[in-house]
């Protein structure tokens, strides 16, 4: 009685699976093949030949890294394999797993928008001071305050603020119109764009407006 479990245990240890058909096979069979330092046993010569003719599987270290999926916090159904913005609300997509590096997704956009903000603010500050200079008593009487120098300086500084610092807003606003998913970027891009175009036309083509709308002097 005591010898039977020992024999069964030995037999179970010598049984393996055919990697082709999946059936059990005794390791004492004469049908063997080696690959990557490992010996495989086969139930038939056909399975052994099929195994030898198949290309070797890639080693674990040779497998490509998994692709990170990005999604929108507000619209989980939006998913893609690269960073970007949501086509519905315009928000930056975030990685679904923590496997993405710190430089991907929202952090990269945060750095980009921060850089645009500070450069835009540095250019917008002198525009604000020049535009409000006529309200300061000592400066209000100076001819240059309402002259061409002030206007052209404001225009030159405003162009990069709107067209470069605000470019991501226009991109997302246009995308929202094309996809018919109107959102806050639609409002921002239309409002800022209309104000800038109106000011640019008034600056470059003042005669396009009635005389009552032009500044005298």
Image: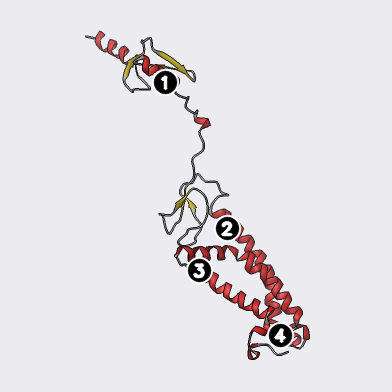
Along the polypeptide, which appears first: circle 3 or circle 4?
4
Along the polypeptide, which appears first: circle 2 or circle 1?
1
Residue furthest left in the image = 1
Q: Nearer the viewer, mark 2 or mark 3?
A: 3
Give me the residue at 40% from left, 20% from top.
Answer: 50
Q: Nearer the viewer, mark 4 or mark 1?
A: 1
For disc 3, the marked residue is 186
Q: Nearer the viewer, mark 2 or mark 1?
A: 1
For disc 4, the marked residue is 134
Q: Secondary structure at mark 3?
A: helix
Kindly identify which numbered label has been placed on residue 38.
none
- 122, 26: nearer the viewer: 26
Query: As drawn, is 180 to the left or to the right of 215?
Result: left
The relative height of residue 189 versus residue 19 in the rendered view (above or below) is below
For disc 1, the marked residue is 51
**Quadrant of the image occupied by residue 163:** bottom right
For disc 2, the marked residue is 110
Along the polypeptide, which appears first: circle 4 or circle 2?
2
- Number of other residues with Cα within 10 Å of mark 3, as a class: few under 14, some 14 to 19, many 20 or more: many
Q: Nearer the viewer, mark 1 or mark 3?
A: 1
The relative height of residue 67 versus residue 138 in the rendered view (above or below) is above
Q: Secondary structure at mark 1?
A: helix
Give me the residue at 53% from left, 70% from top.
Answer: 188
Q: Quadrant of the N terminus?
A: top left
């Amino acid at each position: 009685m005591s010898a039977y479990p020992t024999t069964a245990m030995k037999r179970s240890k010598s049984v393996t699976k055919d990697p082709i058909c999946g059936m059990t096979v005794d390791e004492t069979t004469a049908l063997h093949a080696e690959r990557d330092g490992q010996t495989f046993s086969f139930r038939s010569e056909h399975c052994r030949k099929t195994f030898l003719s198949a290309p070797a599987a890639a080693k674990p270290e040779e497998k490509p890294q998994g692709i990170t999926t990005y999604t929108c916090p507000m619209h989980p159904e939006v998913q893609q394999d690269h960073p970007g913005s949501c086509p519905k609300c315009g928000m930056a997509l975030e990685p679904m797993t923590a496997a993405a590096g710190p430089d991907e997704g929202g952090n990269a956009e945060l750095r980009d928008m921060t850089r645009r903000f500070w450069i835009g603010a540095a250019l917008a500050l002198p525009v604000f001071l020049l535009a409000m200079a006529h309200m300061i008593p000592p400066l209000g009487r100076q001819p240059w305050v309402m002259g061409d120098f002030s206007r052209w300086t404001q225009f030159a500084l405003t162009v990069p603020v709107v067209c470069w610092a605000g470019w991501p807003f226009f991109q997302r606003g246009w995308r929202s119109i094309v996809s018919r998913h109107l959102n806050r970027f639609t409002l921002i891009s239309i409002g800022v764009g209309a104000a800038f175009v109106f000011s640019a036309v008034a600056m470059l083509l003042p005669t396009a407006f009635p005389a009552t709308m032009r500044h005298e002097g």
